[in-house]
Amino acid sequence: MKTVIKILAGLILAFGLVQLMDLGLYLMNRPDSYLFNLGIVVLAIVGVAFAFLGLYLLKVLKPEEEVKEKN
């Protein structure tokens, strides 16, 4: 049950990251150069956050597979 809760929390976090990515793309589309730069920074932060989220979900799901193989 804890694994399911962790996966659902990861999916909710991923949805929030997608919204932040949308914000970054919106800022990059603005004519002001400082907003463009801010959009690039937001996209970089979201990219790193997606990488850490993927590694976390991989870590959460891997022990479950090992338990199934032992039985």
Image (cartoon, rainbow, N blue to C red):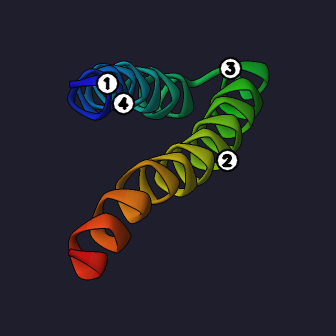
Q: Residues within 10 Å of mark 3 (few under 14, many from 20)?
A: some
User: Distance from label 1 to label 2 (Cα)?
Assistant: 25 Å
The single residue placed furthest to the bottom in the displayed view is 69
Instruction: Report which residue position mark 3 lands on.
Output: 35
Please say if the residues under marks 3 and 1 sit with CB atoms less than 8 Å apart. no
Instruction: Report which residue position mark 1 lands on.
Output: 2
Image position, residue 46 (x, y; %)? 58, 37
- Residue closest to the eye, 62 or 8: 62
Secondary structure beneath dot 1 equals: helix
**x 68%, y 20%: residue:** 35
Instruction: Report which residue position mark 4 lands on.
Output: 10
Between discs 2 and 3, the one toward the N terminus: 3
Identity of the amino acid at label 1? Lys
Please say if the residues under marks 2 and 3 sit with CB atoms less than 8 Å apart. no
**x 41%, y 64%: residue:** 62
**x 32%, y 65%: residue:** 67
* Looking at the image, residue 67 lies above or below residue 17: below
Between discs 3 and 1, the one toward the N terminus: 1
Identity of the amino acid at label 4? Gly
Image position, residue 66 (x, y; %)? 36, 72
Between discs 4 and 1, the one toward the N terminus: 1
Identity of the amino acid at label 2? Val
Between discs 3 and 4, the one toward the N terminus: 4
Secondary structure beneath dot 2 equals: helix
- Residue closest to the eye, 54 or 68: 68
